[in-house]
Image (tube, grey):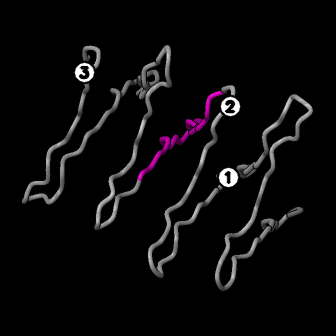
Amino acid sequence: VNARSTEHIYISAGSVNERSNRGGSVAVRTNSVETTKSGPIILSTGTSKESASGSIHMGTQENQYGSNSFSTTTGSVPISRTGSISMKVGASFEANGITVESGNAQNDKSAGDISLIAGSSLSSTGGLIQLTSGLTSQTYQSGVINIGTGLSQTSSGGINVNTGNSNLGRS
């Protein structure tokens, strides 16, 4: 589908019908192949000579009954290596960062958690979680890593640092 300059393209699924009580869905996928990898799906904004490029927004919509989840995954592979998921902010005169933030809770409910969990291995080394601050090539200070708990009226949370148990060697 191509649009002429300044025209918009909208892809929309059907509204809720009374029988299914569910709206339509939109699927974007490449064809399957037998011997090589399938083609990529590329979501990209255009460039601009005199301003910033456009934004890409993906998410679920707000609703009084709750929004649904948003998931990014790579496929499972039984005999080879899976693909990776990478988020990166491009280099710039002054680059922006990446923020990962869980949802806030209303009233007396618990807020969302953020979990970083490295992969497990049945017969080799488990995955690594590495936190590294930014480097500098000048005489400036490198970035800082801050680990702390949030403020509370009654009691703030603790910080736990543990190593796993080992049956045969050092933990």
The crowd level at tag 3 (other Cα within 10 Å; few <14, some 14-19, many 20+) is few
Instruction: Name the residue tied to disc 2.
Output: 94
Q: Position of residue 103 (x, y in %)?
A: 49, 63
Is residue 63 located in the magenta-colored stretch of the structure? no
Type of amino acid at the residue the image marks with label 3: Glu
Instruction: Name the residue tied to disc 3.
Output: 7
The crowd level at tag 1 (other Cα within 10 Å; few <14, some 14-19, many 20+) is few
Q: Main secondary structure of the magenta part?
A: loop
Residue occupying image coordinates x 61% and y 35%: 88
> Which marked residue is nearer to the observer: mark 1 or mark 2?
2
Answer with left or right where residue 65 lies relative to residue 166.
Answer: left
**Mark 1 or mark 2, earlier in chain:** 2
Above/below status of 159 relative to 5: below
Residue occupying image coordinates x 41% and y 28%: 43
**Mark 3 or mark 1, earlier in chain:** 3
Please give the range of residues in magenta. Answer: 70-91
Answer with left or right where residue 125 lies relative to residue 52.
Answer: right
The crowd level at tag 2 (other Cα within 10 Å; few <14, some 14-19, many 20+) is few
Type of amino acid at the residue the image marks with label 1: Ser
Picture quarter with the N terminus? top left
Asked if marks 2 and 3 touch (Cβ < 8 Å), the reply is: no
Residue occupying image coordinates x 66% and y 27%: 91
Residue occupying image coordinates x 28% and y 67%: 65
Label 2, label 3: how far apart the Cα atoms are = 32 Å
Picture quarter with the C terminus? bottom right
Q: Position of residue 28 (x, y in %)?
A: 31, 33
Q: Secondary structure under badge 2?
A: loop
Answer with left or right where residue 50 lies relative to residue 43.
Answer: right
Instruction: Name the residue tied to disc 1.
Output: 121
